[in-house]
Image (tube, coloured by chain):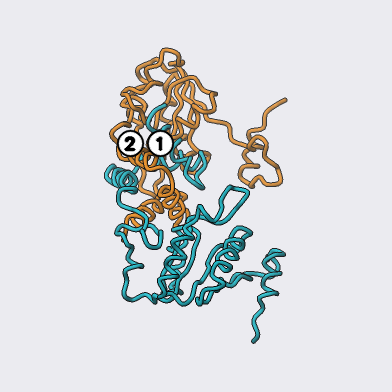
Chain colours: A orange, B cyan
Amino acid sequence: MNAIEELTESLSRLPGIGKKSASRIAYHLLASDRGECRRLGQELASLHDRICRCSVCGSYTETDPCPICTSPLRERGLLCVVEQPQDVRTIEDSREFRGLFHVLGGLISPLDGMGPEQLSIPSLMERIRAGEITEVIIATNPTVEGDTTALYIQRLLAESPVMVSRLASGLPVGGDLEYADRLTLARSFRGRVAL
Amino acid sequence: MNAIEELTESLSRLPGIGKKSASRIAYHLLASDRGECRRLGQELASLHDRICRCSVCGSYTETDPCPICTSPLRERGLLCVVEQPQDVRTIEDSREFRGLFHVLGGLISPLDGMGPEQLSIPSLMERIRAGEITEVIIATNPTVEGDTTALYIQRLLAESPVMVSRLASGLPVGGDLEYADRLTLARSFRGRVAL
């Protein structure tokens, strides 16, 4: 196996890249500038050395604690609980939330052997017990696992004085009723808002 | 811009990878094994050092001349002319051709400023003048540029004793008449085969 085949093989293991796309990318890189290709390679090779997990919130960062956890501009009373580190980026990109984050590192899913003990729920409770937080917004996916995890956290916090909320679920903005699935439609009925 | 954003930016410049897929790949790599990520990085960084163009046929190779040009098992009288190095791989994968290759490095396309002088046509003529080759199979794409280039080479070889052929064009095997475009259908009528 030569270097092109090796690279094609490695690229095709990436998510969303099949054998054809991998080969196309490999040949594109060969035809492109040597320096650019080397730079991409170095970015990849050093990725794990440059990025670590934030010891406070669990998101990916170059400095520990991460810039969000240490920022004086964030509302320290609001805590958004997400499943994975990339959810932090998605929410940050929406510019809708100015509080802090907590990454669970997964969702409760008994079928996959994921219980609450595998998630960073103890450190979540510790952060809440510290007293600064007044509202916890659970932003797990609107799936069975996301719902289960949200319910679990909500129950843990039942005795606590913090407010617990969950992201609204319903029809996507710009979407079409005709293409909405039954469950989404059902949830948007149940969560209907008075006008 | 941190390392993840840099990597996402670089990945999204690759063909067929948009911003969403690039971000998905970056987070996948972060969540995956450090060694695997480093290995992919090193494969990319060293790609141009390990791969060069074959001085005989122009395809990508780790050794010059390439394994196809030096193989004693190939039919040295058959020469397949292709546009780009990756076409060699595509044809090799089909296991349909056992001769030698010649990579043009592009197609004649006056609109893009590509004339015959930018292609490796002089070295093609030299290889043919050497006398071993008896048939030249032109395997350029069935496009305007591919047709023009094929016609140009055919005319250059009009006085030469070698046979010049072109890959058949028509309906793809397993395809459906209903979905064939007009030009493909027209060409498959013109190129119809007696049964």
The x and y percentages for residue A22 are 43, 53
Question: Based on the displayed image, in which of its 4 quarters is residue A82 positioned?
Answer: top left
Residue B155 against residue A148 in the figure, above or below: below
Instruction: Read off the residue under disc 2.
Output: A47
Mark 2 closeness class: few <14, some 14–19, many ≥20 residues within 10 Å: many
- State the CA–CA distance, disc 1 to disc 2: 8 Å
Residue plotted at (57% across, 65% down): B150
The x and y percentages for residue B28 are 39, 43
Residue plotted at (36% across, 23% down): A66
Name of the residue lying farthest toward the top: A72
Q: Are marks 1 and 2 in contact (CB under 8 Å)?
A: yes
The quadrant of the picture occupied by the C terminus of chain B is bottom right
Q: Chain of mark 2?
A: A
Name of the residue lying farthest toward the bottom: B195
Label 2's element?
Answer: helix
Label 1's element?
Answer: helix
The x and y percentages for residue B165 are 55, 74
Camera-nearest residue between A84 and B35: B35
Camera-nearest residue between B166 and B4: B166
The image shows a total of numbered marks equal to 2
Name of the residue lying farthest toward the front: B159
Residue plotted at (54% across, 30% down): A167
Q: Amino acid at mark 1?
A: Leu
Q: Is residue B112 left or right of residue A21?
A: right
The x and y percentages for residue B56 are 37, 62
Say which mark, if any, is on residue B147: none
Mark 1 closeness class: few <14, some 14–19, many ≥20 residues within 10 Å: many
Camera-nearest residue between B67 and A87: B67
Q: Is residue B131 left or right of residue A93?
A: left
Instruction: Read off the residue under disc 1.
Output: B7
Q: Amino acid at mark 2?
A: Leu
Camera-nearest residue between B76 and B5: B76
